[in-house]
Structures are given as C-alpha cells and as structure tokens.
Image (cartoon, helix red, strand yellow):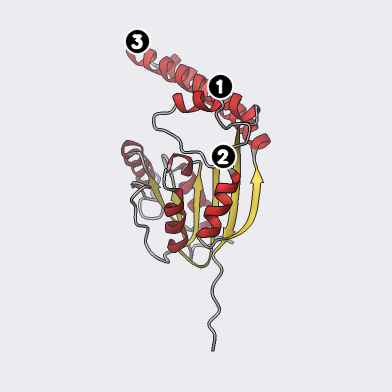
Amino acid sequence: GLTSEMSMLDLGAGLGGPARAITEAYGIWVTGFEAEAEIAKIGNELSAIAGLSKKAPVSVFDPETAELPKRKFDAIFSKEALCTVENKTRFLLQIYDSLKPNGQFFITDYLVTDKGIDSPLVVAWNAEEEKPNHFWMKQHYAAGLKEAHFEVRVTEDLTARYLGFITGGFQGLRKNIEALIGAEEDAKKQADLRRALAHESKRWAVRTEAIQAGHIAPTRFSGMVIAKTKIR
C-alpha cells in the first residue's frame, strides 16, 4: 500500500540501497538512519549520485539516544539493526511514537533461541562483530512490542529463507571482489580486497553455523499502530 503521498523511515539503513530501491519502486519518501557515521556519509553520497538526495537521504543517528520525530511516518522498516541496540524497549517506544495512526512497522532481526543461551556459536558470532549484539529471545520481543502498544499481525521465522540469502549473496560478493582484484593493478589494494573477502568469509561462516544449528533465528515482526477511536 505504499504510495508517493507517504513517508517511510529506514532504521539501520546501511548504504541506503533498500531505501533507494523502495523509493524508486513506489515513489515514497524514505528517510534512512544509520548508526555508523562513515557508512551513513557514503550512503548519502550514493543517494545524491542517484538523484535521490531529497527522497532517500541517509543520516547518522545513535539508536540508544535518538529522539525520533513524533507521528511523522506512515511506515517504519528495520533490517537486522535492533540486535545491536541495548535498550530495545525504549527504541520500540520511539518507533511507536514516530508512526502516524494506522502506520505500519516491519522489523527483521536476529533472535537468540533456547538452544542459543550460553552457546559457543553465539559467542563466536559476537566475536566476529565490530560492536556487541544484545540479542533478545522471541518472548522478549513479544513483551517489548506489547509494552510499546503495537498491534502485531505477523511473527515469522525466516531461517530457511535467510540461509538461501546468505548462500546466494556471498557467491555474488566473492564474484564481485574477485573481479575487482583482477582489475586492480595496485598490489596493496589487491591485498586489502583479499583481506576484506577473508574477513567476510569468516564472519558469514560463523553466522551461518549459528543459524543452521538453530541457536540464532532470523525473525520478522510486522503490524501497525491502531488509530484510537474518539468517544463522543
């Protein structure tokens, strides 16, 4: 139901690729917020290059302290960003307050399962990350969304789909980086690209093992803010 009359917030926007794709597909105005300053800067530059500096800007923000604008957005989207937020309950309340009445939310995140409590696979996952994760279990999310007054319509385990995404995505990454290495004449830059590929290979191998073992579950939550009926 997205249209050019609507506005959307992308939390954890990264380089802004999803924001630009959604804008180009539906004409909707998408504001991207990204926690990493360097990534946000490059993402905003990419939006400018695409001619979408106004319709899909990317800005830096701190999810632990950010005050989102009140009742501004028709939809809010977050993709694997909340697992790094320590005070998730506060953040969910911010999301709720930033949505218009009947606004929609769509969150995908990595959840720790019963098997994953004290799991060495989860410890290994965190060891490969640049900043710590604060994984919630499914029941924690359910309680947090309820406390934030969301009407949850869908809770879906995306494990099988994500394993397919990881396999296909990593094959594409390896192909692209190997092409860049082949086209690069500078030996130092070639070495940097090889190190980057090795780092990503290890990181995603660790993630895949934890997901395949059922210790981490990629999960989708979606729903809306129910408009309150005025009593006359």
Q: Amino acid at mark 2?
A: Leu
Mark 2 and mark 1: Cα distance apart in space: 18 Å
> Which numbered tag is attached to residue 111?
2
Mark 3 or 2 closer to N-term?
Answer: 2
| Residue at image coords 43%, 28% | 129
Identify residue for label 1.
205
Amino acid type at circle 3 is Ala
For mark 2, give the secondary structure. strand
How far apart, in angstroms, are the residues tagged by discs 3 and 2? 41 Å
120 or 199: nearer the viewer: 120
Counting residues from the N terminus, which is met first, the one under dot 2 or under dot 1? 2
Q: Which mark is residue 187?
A: 3
Q: Quadrant of the C terminus?
A: bottom right
- Residue 65, x across and y down, in percent: 33, 50
Q: Return the x and y of residue 104 as percentages of the image width and height.
A: 54, 60
Mark 3–mark 1 Cα distance, whole angstroms, equals: 27 Å
10 Å crowding of disc 2: few (<14), some (14-19), many (20+): many
